[in-house]
Image: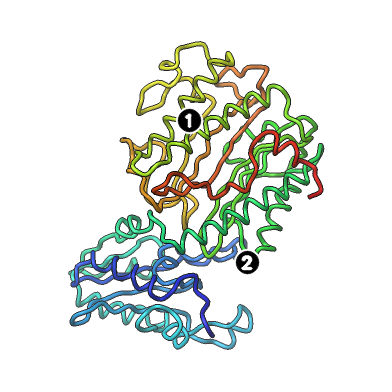
């Protein structure tokens, strides 16, 4: 079976070399992939491999472990995989097997997963330290914990730092993912009409993903009216009434690399005055945050930009009655009253995981890392005025309005590049698109 991998062997080998250069040669490295997760009884969820496994060697099937040990003067990589088994393959499809893995994947050798305990046990007895991603494979966890003379260490911090900056090929895959997701959002907006079901919008988007040979990178959020004010709403089972906004947060994966887009639009094709006021404010805040996505800026600069615009805008609209400084609160904590309506962070890293590795999340105790070329981030400010809330006074004029606008941004030497720019977000463009035939 010929492998179709998203990267060249040279790129995979380069990643492995840069990683293993940082590991002591008297160590054993063990990278397990994810187990199969069952939905009910013997019915499993669609399988998705561990991101570290995908990053280091591209193996996407279950029941696999990547091992690396030092032999004389170089590192040797071994991929443990499911062996060929005709009876099992009749039910679940042909397996690559050990011979195919050894010849078609970027590793030195391949062994049967059946022999994992014996082979790993032998190497553990000869090493001083095991670099293992724990909590993924119970067999490996037990083997390492029972190896009395072997210390354990976590390799993820090394790999996380490598994954933060994307290669040219990774960026190509992320741009493809962004293009597919953008087109899916456009297709959904075109279907907009009063009374449409949240689930119907979801079906349009996810059908486009499937037709493009991709899959959801997370559970799609389609919230109409007050449901748009629930940050991780995912029931998607209500009809959206005439005059309501719908917030759609949906992205897809290409070769494991995610996109993550949010658009908010009126199902009847026309923003009301109050919806327009909130939408324009959120868009202004998003554009300000994208502008500071510059190489050399600190992570927190994005959140400072959105917070300043949103807080001042809410003062201007009469939602807040205080100074800008009071509205924002502490420069690091952002604990002012504007947070009653903008509760989350401005963005996160994006890559093999939707909330990708590298830090830069809400709650960090410092300004965060410096933005560098090759990093991909989301920029997603929002304002939420849930009429159902009892913890804060919601202005009647804006009750039931929730707006978030999210794009994926590549940091470059020349400035920010919006990977999702083909997904419309101006009021004029959105109003022209809702319900159009295309």
**Label annotation for residue 306:** 1
Q: Residue at x 55, y 62 (%)?
A: 254
**Label annotation for residue 27:** none
Q: Residue at x 64, y 65 (%)?
A: 213
Q: Is residue 338 left or right of residue 154?
A: right
Mark 1: few/some/many CA within 10 Å (<14, 14-19, 20+)? many
- Residue placed most toward the observer, 163 or 363: 163
Rendering quarter of residue 216: bottom right
| Residue 307 position within the rendered picture, expressed as x and y whole percent measured from the top left | 46, 27
Q: Which residue is mark 2?
A: 43
Can you say whether 432 is above or below 179 in the image? Answer: above
Q: In the picture, which quadrant includes the N terminus?
A: bottom right
- Residue placed most toward the observer, 104 or 186: 186
Q: Earlier in the sequence, mark 2 or mark 1?
A: 2
Can you say whether 4 is above or below 236 in the image? Answer: below
Q: Residue at x 58, y 46 (%)?
A: 421
Q: Is residue 124 left or right of residue 304?
A: left
| Residue 90 position within the rendered picture, expressed as x and y whole percent measured from the top left | 63, 84
Q: Is residue 186 left or right of residue 356?
A: right
Can you say whether 105 is above or below 389 in the image? Answer: below
Mark 2: few/some/many CA within 10 Å (<14, 14-19, 20+)? few
| Residue 348 position within the rendered picture, expressed as x and y whole percent measured from the top left | 45, 44
Closer to the eye: label 2 or 1: 1
- Residue placed most toward the observer, 163 or 80: 163
- Residue placed most toward the observer, 77 or 128: 77
C-alpha distance separating marks 2 and 1: 44 Å
């Amino acid at each position: 079976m010929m492998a179709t991998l998203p990267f060249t062997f040279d790129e995979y080998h380069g990643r492995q070399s840069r990683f293993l250069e940082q590991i002591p040669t008297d160590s054993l490295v063990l990278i397990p992939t994810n187990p199969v997760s069952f939905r009910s009884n013997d019915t499993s969820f669609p399988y998705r491999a561990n991101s570290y496994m995908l990053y280091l060697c591209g193996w996407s099937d279950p029941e696999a472990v990547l091992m690396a040990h030092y032999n004389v003067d170089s590192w040797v990589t071994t991929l443990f995989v499911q062996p060929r088994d005709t009876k099992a393959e009749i039910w679940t499809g042909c397996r690559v097997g050990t011979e195919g893995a050894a010849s078609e994947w970027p590793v030195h050798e391949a062994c049967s997963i059946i022999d994992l305990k014996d082979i790993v046990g032998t190497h553990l007895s000869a090493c001083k330290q095991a670099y293992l991603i724990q909590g993924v494979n119970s067999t490996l966890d037990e083997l390492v914990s029972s190896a009395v003379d072997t210390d354990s260490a976590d390799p993820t911090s090394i790999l996380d730092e490598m994954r933060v900056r994307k290669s040219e090929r990774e960026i190509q895959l992320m741009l493809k993912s962004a293009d597919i997701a953008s087109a899916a959002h456009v297709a959904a907006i075109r279907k907009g009409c009063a009374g449409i079901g949240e689930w119907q919008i979801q079906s349009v988007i996810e059908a486009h993903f499937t037709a493009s040979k991709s899959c959801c990178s997370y559970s799609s959020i389609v919230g109409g009216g007050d449901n748009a004010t629930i940050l991780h709403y995912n029931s998607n089972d209500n009809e959206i009434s005439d005059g309501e906004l719908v917030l759609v947060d949906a992205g897809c994966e290409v070769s494991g690399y995610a996109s993550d887009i949010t658009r908010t639009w009126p199902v009847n094709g026309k923003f009301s005055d109050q919806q327009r006021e909130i939408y324009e404010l959120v868009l202004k805040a998003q554009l300000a945050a994208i502008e500071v996505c510059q190489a050399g800026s600190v992570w927190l600069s994005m959140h400072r930009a959105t917070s300043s615009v949103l807080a001042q805008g809410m003062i201007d609209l009469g939602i807040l009655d205080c100074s800008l400084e009071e509205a924002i609160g502490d420069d690091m904590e952002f604990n002012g009253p504007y947070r009653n309506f903008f509760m989350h962070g401005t963005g996160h890293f994006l890559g093999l995981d939707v909330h990708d590795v590298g830090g830069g999340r809400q709650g960090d105790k410092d300004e965060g890392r410096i933005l560098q070329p090759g990093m991909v981030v989301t920029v997603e400010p929002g304002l939420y005025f849930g009429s159902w809330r009892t913890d804060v006074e919601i202005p009647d004029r804006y009750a039931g309005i929730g707006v978030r606008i999210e794009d994926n941004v590549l940091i470059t030497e020349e400035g920010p590049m919006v990977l999702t720019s083909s997904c419309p977000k101006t009021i004029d463009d959105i109003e022209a698109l809702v319900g159009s035939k295309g």
